[in-house]
Amino acid sequence: MPKAHTFLRGLLVVFLAPMPGPLLAAEHAADALDLTRSPVGYMALAVFVLAYLVVMAEEFTHLRKSKPVILAAGIIWAMIAYVYVAHGIPHTAEAALRHNLEEYAELMLFLLVAMTYINAMDERGVFDALRAWLLEKGFGFRTLFWMTGTLAFFISPVADNLTTALLMCAVVLAVGKDSPRFVALACINIVVAANAGGAFSPFGDITTLMVWQAGIVDFWTFFALFVPSVVNFVVPAAIMHFAVPGAAPGAVRESVRMLPGARRIIGLFILTIATAVAFHNFLFLPPVIGMLTGLAYLQLFGYYLKMKACRSLRDTAEEAEKIGDVVPFDVFNRIARAEWDTLLFFYGVVMCVGGLGFIGYLAKLSEVIYTGWGATLANVTVGVLSAIVDNIPIMFAVLKMNPDMSMGQWLLVTLTAGVGGSLLSIGSAAGVALMGQARGMYTFFSHLKWTPVIALGYAASIWVHMWINARYFQ
């Protein structure tokens, strides 16, 4: 048995050990090995590509996207760690892994609080009330086209683009179910608007949140992207406007009443955002600490609602009617309803990309595209790629590369990574979700038909950014 063990270990060392070269010059634990031309480096790339191909096939396999990337992350870091152990410097890989894990933990907890608030507002009927109000007004198709797009643009900076898109699509389907053309155009407009709205806010998208949390762009500087984001939304919408049917559907009567505490939860969410910004800007603490403090606001308010519900149950029926319908509220139920698949997918991506960066691939890629091509072309390409590959790994890779760029270029890559996903229906979570929600009316090809128009808005937003924000490029 010992001989077999020794033989197996020898085979692993031969297969996983890096190629001869500069990496053998590592003399102490602080040295990192260049594994880019080693078998383990090539295997890590292959594992990541294979995992991401499985992610892209989610619509057909129905396998949640978090599963392959979490597995890939474990395999990649296990291979890296084995090589470092073989070279007698195990703590170097350990320190790098802990650094990536810390980055993920901050972002995950931040997103978890935001998702909890969104779920709490959903449970209290805030979004249902907004949808009912839109349906009740009896707007024409063209008016609804602009209203749903505009609302998606302004809601997505504080809610995620997926929730925003699903809410607006529900309105579109309720009034336009007999007009597939209207549904398709409105859904395209909603996807573009939701992605554009998320690009100018630190809270609007995971990519903008990553840039803010990394300390590269401060909170208020993001709003320099407001006008370019408006252009990105308005240019294709203005062209599609003429293809929207001019008819007016009848009003849909639907009585929806928000549950007790709904408006106060909205107020607490705004207060939570303000707390996160204040902690970061004035106390120099990570924004996640402010968000977790805001979660305590919601927890305490949830306790108040539960106590109020318990008291009302002891009241007479007559008194209970005066108070209104009281529904017990449990904040932990809202946490449980968070998009855990998204959060775990984010973990897998961060760890996979972090592993590839530690191997040395991101430094080489940065040298090729940011030094060879130039920052502007590289950042525009990042946006185009995000229409095919999820923008989370792309932006995380850029942050790991940390190219030497002006603030204008960092804002440019934030813009392009945020809005580039609108070029294809599969380029963003909003587009993928609406293909399922409006199945048969909003499809990959109905979106692809308008891709040239969306690309025109993409190009126009870049040009406007480079014009009005020229001072940031100096």
Image (cartoon, rainbow, N blue to C red):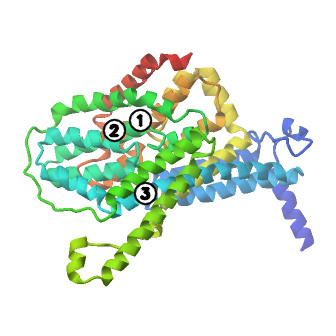
Asked whether the residues under the numbered discs 1 and 3 touch, taking CB atoms below 8 Å apart as contact, a structural biologist would say no
Q: Is residue 67 visible?
A: yes
- Give the camera-side residue of 200 and 281: 281
- Residue 221, how many percent across, how many down? 50, 30
Looking at the image, is mark 1 or mark 3 earlier in the sequence?
A: 3
Dot 1 amino acid type: Val
| Mark closer to the observer (1, 3) | 3
Say which residue appears at 72% left-offset and 51% top-offset: 97
How many badges with numbers are in the image? Answer: 3
Dot 2 amino acid type: Val
Figure quadrant of the C terminus:
top right
Residue identified by numbered label 1: 419
How busy is the neighbourhood of tag 1: few (under 14 within 10 Å), some, or many (20 plus)? many
Spatial separation of the CA atoms under disc 1 and disc 2? 7 Å
Figure quadrant of the N terminus:
bottom right
Q: Is residue 50 visible?
A: no
Could you tell me which secondary element the residue under label 2 belongs to? helix
Residue identified by numbered label 2: 192
Spatial separation of the CA atoms under disc 1 and disc 3? 25 Å
How busy is the neighbourhood of tag 3: few (under 14 within 10 Å), some, or many (20 plus)? many
Dot 3 amino acid type: Tyr
Asked whether the residues under the numbered discs 1 and 2 touch, taking CB atoms below 8 Å apart as contact, a structural biologist would say yes
When asked about the image quadrant of residue 19, the answer is top right
Residue identified by numbered label 3: 117
**385 up-or-down from 255: above or below:** above
Q: Is residue 53 left or right of residue 99?
A: left
Looking at the image, is mark 1 or mark 2 earlier in the sequence?
A: 2
